[in-house]
Image: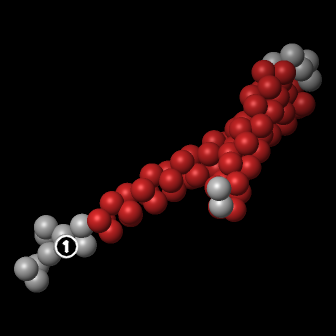
Amino acid sequence: MNFYKIKKALAITFATLFLYFGVSTMINTYNVKNAFVFIIFFFSSSMMILISMAIIASLIFRKFKKNEDHTHLDNPVQKNDPHL
């Protein structure tokens, strides 16, 4: 297992933990009585959820894009090549 896979696994792990923390903060936000504190917690937990989901999605889509690039290396001649 190379360094890139370990780095990617750690990033997904931390993003998942950050997502869990954001969701738990969002759930606990609804128990707050003060409206100002509710707004602050609501937007901060929404930002945590958004950032963690963006990190997870980018890592997953990067994996699919990397696999897609390798499939083109197997067939170097493209069907739509105008020089054929």
Q: Nearer the viewer, residue 68 or 30?
A: 68
Question: Percent position (x, y) of residue 35?
Answer: 86, 25
Outermost residue toward the front in this view: 1
Q: Quadrant of the N terminus?
A: bottom right
Q: Nearer the viewer, residue 29 or 71?
A: 71
Q: Is residue 23 above or below residue 3?
A: above
Which type of secondary structure does the marked residue at label 1 adopt? loop
Q: Quick check: can you spot residue 22?
A: no
Q: Residue at x 37, y 58 (%)?
A: 68
**Which quadrant holds residue 24?**
top right
Q: Quick check: can you spot residue 16?
A: yes
Question: Percent position (x, y) of residue 83?
Answer: 10, 83
Colour convention of the picture: secondary structure
Q: Quadrant of the C terminus?
A: bottom left
Give the tally of numbered discs.
1
Q: Residue at x 54, y 48 (%)?
A: 60
**Label 1 Cα crowd, 10 Å radius (few <14 / some 14-19 / many 20+):** few
Q: Nearer the viewer, residue 27 or 78?
A: 78
Q: Is residue 40 above or below residue 58?
A: above
Q: Residue at x 78, y 21 (%)?
A: 27
Q: Residue at x 84, y 21 (%)?
A: 28
Outermost residue toward the left in this view: 84
**Which quadrant holds residue 13?**
top right
Q: Nearer the viewer, residue 13 or 40?
A: 13
User: Is 42 left or right of 62, judged from the image as shown?
Assistant: right
Q: Which residue is mark 1?
A: 77
Question: Percent position (x, y) of residue 47?
Answer: 73, 43
**Which quadrant holds residue 20?**
top right
Outermost residue toward the bottom in this view: 83
Q: Is residue 72 above or below residue 49?
A: below
Q: What amino acid is found at the position of numbered circle 1 in the picture?
A: Val
User: Is 68 left or right of 56, judged from the image as shown?
Assistant: left
